[in-house]
Image (tube, rainbow, N blue to C red):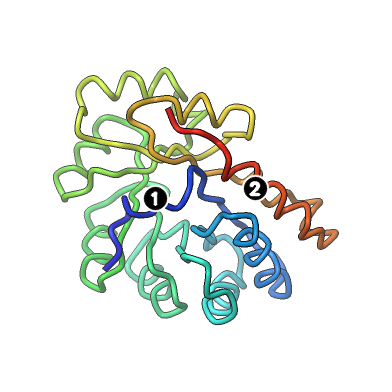
Amino acid sequence: MLNTLDLVAHGPVIPVIVIHRLEDAVPMAQALVDGGVKVLEVTLRTPIALQCMEAIAKAVPGAILGAGTVRNRADAQAAKDAGCVFAVSPGYTSEVGRACRDIGLPLLPGTATGSEVMQANADGYLFLKFFPAMQAGGIPMLKALAGPFTDVVFCPTGGITLETAPQFLALPNVKVCGGSWLTPTDAVAAKDWGRITLLAKEASALKRG
């Protein structure tokens, strides 16, 4: 079974993807993979999200597919059934952690406070999503969390851009960033997959601290 920390080896950015048209799923995923971004988080924020995951899992073998916005046991099971190999949650409860462990679906749990970090740690999670990154305190908050949580590393997500990602990646307790800038709404609407490949290449070239 995949260890979520293994995802870090595939690049510095995990795109956070919201798909509104099923026909966009495969070409969008392929465009990202072609640009060197293999780890894809497709969020459960639209009615067709699970269908999109199934399509990507079948048609884009280079993708390491995860489900975002996993909030409960039903979400976790549906994501695994759709072909996802990891899950990402916007927050953390022991219930969602237990649900993912029960079905063998590695989880990147969402946290925003010290208490949430402690709860996730108590359940065995040391690689955490920090969400929503900018609204929850951004770089100053991550620096503050580094003090008491020396053994915890983060994937900050939410409001990060190509311009600000290097500042996050420079932090010792940040291993990778989540970002929605790789799949801009206007590029997807225009089916400009070439632009998405270029954005993926830019993201892949970012350096960690």
40 lies above or below 54:
above
Picture coordinates of residue 200 (x, y %)? 64, 50
* Count of all numbered marks drawn on residues in the image: 2
Mark 2 or mark 1: whose residue is earlier in sequence: 1
25 lies above or below 198:
below
**Callout 2 crowding tier (Cα within 10 Å): few <14, some 14–19, many ≥20:** some
In this rendering, would 190 be left or right of 56?
right
Look at 65% across and 42% down and name the residue there: 202
Picture coordinates of residue 64 (x, y %)? 46, 65
Question: Which amino acid lies under the numbered mark 1 shown in the image of this protein?
Answer: Ala
> The C terminus is located in which quarter?
top left
196 lies above or below 174:
below
Question: Which amino acid lies under the numbered mark 2 shown in the image of this protein?
Answer: Lys
Q: Quadrant of residue 25?
A: bottom right
Look at 53% across and 38% down and name the residue there: 158
Look at 26% across and 68% down and name the residue there: 1
Give 91 or 157, whichever is nearer the viewer. 157
In this rendering, would 92 be left or right of 124?
right
Residue of label 2: 201
In this rendering, would 50 be left or right of 209?
right
Residue of label 1: 9
Q: Distance between the residues labelled 2 and 1?
A: 16 Å
74 lies above or below 44:
below
